[in-house]
Amino acid sequence: MATVRTAGKVPGAEPPVRRTQHDGGQSSPGATASEPNARVGAADVKPLTRRGSTTILAAVGFVWFAVCVVTVARWVSSSEEFRPAPRIGPDEMADWRMIALRVFEVISLIVLALFLWFSVVQPIRKTGKLSLDGRFVIGGLICFVADAFLNVQQYLFAWNSANVNMGVWVRFLPFHNPDAPSRYAESLIWGPPMYVYFCAGVAIVACHHAKKVRRRWPDISKVPLFVGIFVAEFLFDFIVENTVIRTTHAYAFAKTYEPLTLWSGSVHQFPIYESILVAAVGCVFTWMRMEAEDHPDGLSPIESGLVHWRPALRGWVRNFAVLGFCMVTLVFVYHLPFNWLGLIGTSHADLPSYLLPG
């Protein structure tokens, strides 16, 4: 009687499946080289969907969306808060600064319109679905509500009363200090676009240039790559913000941590940690986008747990998960450190009256 050798290769058996970087080190039973998105050496083997924090982030996104709805609804229905902040005197802006402020507002609207068109509208028209970039853009706009956290405890971030505004909703946010001012001019024109181009925008540009670098130096690791990205995003923020502050007086940093502040005490004082934190936020968004580009199915770690949800719910879960990622990144990487350093800070800017709260 013939015996079957277990140590050798059985005639007609499928070759063993190699584990790949994309399937998290797990083999796909029954996968063959003919299946899409799969790899066996040079051939393709369908990868297993990576596990991620999709459900947790979706829960965070859902809660934050509910907070936004309640906050904005209470603000809009408030006769005291939903109205333009008072124009503070006696200081008056120079005419050229007022013109620069209006130009900045127009440019910001154009930039936002371009992002909405190319990242949201066009992908939906072509595929019927939102792309990750589109979700980042929409997530940034929704997370703009969190911008009022800048002054939730003290007046750390000064707003120009000449901004196009309807006051601010800070009074209705969680953790608001009742003694903190709530009558200042949060910009409705140039504020929201900042949450788009400093998050989604820098990620799109960084990934574009990262591809060029990786083609030029295929063996480069992500450590030097992200060091370069961080430096570029730091310089971008530093140049943009200081240009805006000095030309328009649209905003200022009212109270900062002096050891990390340039031009301390002046109206143009600038905390260097502002650019550090903004660059860190940009790097996190860039990392997520780069991970999605490297994944064979185009999934970022934010979305990789969708397989555990019913297909009918996956669209909603993905949207809320990306929103949750945006909120967690902005709060923990930017807002909490900014507030902590501002609250312990001792450098007070010499502000003109139009940058003071009413």
Image (spheres, grey):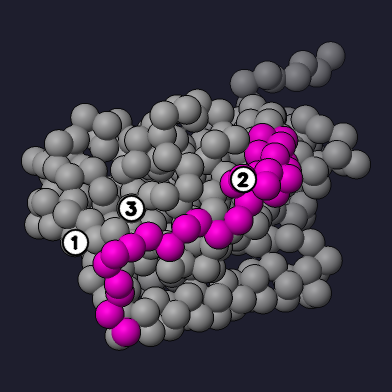
Please provide percent x and percent y for residue 75.
65, 44
- Classify mark 3: helix, strand or loop: loop
Question: From the viewer's perspective, is 109 left or right of 317?
Answer: left
Q: Secondary structure at mark 2?
A: loop
Which residue matches tag 3?
Answer: 356
Residue for point 79% across, 62% down: 129
Camera-side residue of 294 and 34: 294
Q: Residues within 10 Å of mark 2 (few under 14, many from 20)?
A: few
Q: Marks 1 and 2: which is nearer the front? A: 2
Residue 118: give x, y in percent of width and height: 64, 75
Find residue 94 and report its horizontal and vertical position in percent.
Answer: 27, 80
Labels 3 and 2: the sequence-earlier one: 2
Examine the residues drawn in magenta and state their main secondary structure. loop
Question: Disc 2 designates what residue?
Answer: 80
Highlighted range, magenta: 66-95
Q: Which mark is residue 268?
A: 1
